[in-house]
Amino acid sequence: MPSSPQELATLDQQHLWHPFTAMRQWCAPDHTPLMLVEGNGCTLRDQFGKEYLDGNASIWTNIHGHNHPVLNAAISAQLGKVAHTSFLGFTHEPAIRLAKELVDLLPGGKLTRAFFTDNGSTAIESAVRMALQYWKQNGSPQRDTLVAFDRAYHGDTLGAASLGGIPLFKGSGNDFGYRVITVPSLESLESLSAAEQARIAAVIIEPLIQGAAGMRLWPQGMLKALDGWCRQQDVFLILDEVMTGFGRTGKMFACEHEGVVPDFLCLAKGLTGGYLPLAATLTSERVFEGFLGEPHEGRTFFYGHSYAGSQLGCAAALASLQIFRDERVLEELSAKIARLGELMKGLNDARQCGMIAAMTIDSPDLTLGAKASLAARRHGLLTRPVANTVVLMPPLCVTLDELDRMVAALRAALEDIKAPA
Ligand code: PLP
């Protein structure tokens, strides 16, 4: 089997198909794929030994850094027992403990149940299916409609994509089956006709900030007001915290900033510290009880995935929560958030939500974001743009010095491509 970096790159170009990637350009003879071979903290090393700062936390997943000894040890210890067993009809200690720890993170005791899947899209899909099935079998079958927001991104499975408001990510362009109303704002939701409002099963939102839309911030107080509207109408509120969960916004969950506890909280990416695929949909006892019945009544939630509640994933997630406590991760964030804000000052349309920062290159040429990211690589920074928006979302363990270096690399990259920033 070939093992030189060049031979491996050639094999990649011959046999792989990468997500969200223009493959003609990827496979071009003059393109050398970046192969990441090692990591430590915020640093990643490529096949040639060059080091980079992980400025997008490995697609918004990594929380405590790469190669964290506590996470490594927890996964190894679990591996020494068993890696994976079915969660359909069986249970295991890591999932039981994790469910308890997760529901205890939210105040008020409203969320009591954890349903495990293995990625963000399926965490969303579970919530959507639960909401629709709940109303169908609990006396309100007319509630068959989901409300989502313009420019939303909730994942790629057909169910999750049907909620998306970014045409590029709709693929075939179909609406994939669910009845979805897309609104730009809370005000337009409020102004839907009474007949339409009566059909709403749930409203879904990325709280505080829409990620894939290019880090668009919601006005302060919007989430609280939306929650109030949902309570008044007795409509379920689904919060997609796939990106914002686990400290990204400065608190464990974004909904804490506005004192909101939703009916469904969807978690993925950072749940395992960014180590393994695991997702959770948290919900209330009310929803759970709506699915209880005798088998012949057909009230059961017939949905799930082979790797649901993976033992390794749950062990990693428990270790990640342990690190949050032991390393006082949230308490350490305020200085980093302040520094990130300082550093971004002066960049075009700079914005920030906790440890998430972004700026947008002011140009109709929408290739500049990608060019800036490529240039940043030369300066030792890995990041990935959303069109012309360049995002910095480092692991939470980032140091002040690393933040300085990340933004310096970003500025140098913008200079290199002469971006009007
Ligand atoms: N929801 C949000 C807000 C996301 O940012 C993403 C992914 O970027 C998803 C859902 C989908 O998660 P996954 O890629 O794990 O399916």
Image (cartoon, helix red, strand yellow):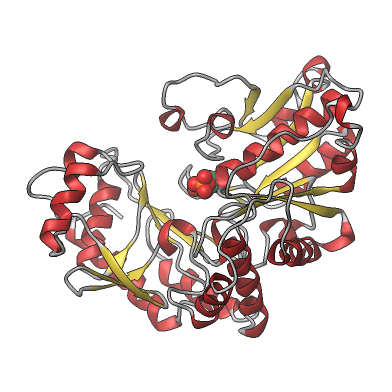
Residue 219 is left or right of residue 390, and the answer is right
Q: Residue at x 65, y 72 (%)?
A: 321
Picture residue at 84% right of the left edge, 55% below the top: 112
Label total for image = 0
From this view, report whether residue 286 is shown above or below residue 54: above
Picture layout, residue 112 above or below residue 335: above
For the point 72% across and 23% down, the residue is 145
Along the horizontal axis of the image, is 363 left or right of 27? right
Q: Quadrant of residue 93?
A: bottom right
* Of 175 and 336, the residue lying toward us: 175
Residue 97 point in image, percent of width and height: 75, 67
Residue 48 coordinates in the image, percent (x, y): 16, 71
Q: Locate the C terminus and report the quarter of the image it occupies.
A: bottom left
Quadrant hosting residue 71: bottom right
Q: Is residue 186 visible?
A: no
User: Split into 4 quadrants, where in the image is the N terminus?
Assistant: bottom left
Q: Residue furthest top?
A: 195
Whether residue 241 is visible to the viewer of this picture, yes or no, is yes
State the image coordinates of residue 177 (x, y, percent, origin top left).
60, 19
301 relative to 108, above or below: above
410 vs 288, left or right, is left
**Furthest residue in direction left, as rendered:** 29
Name the residue located 47 percent from the left edge and 71 percent from the top edge.
340
Q: Nearer the viewer, residue 51 or 401?
A: 51
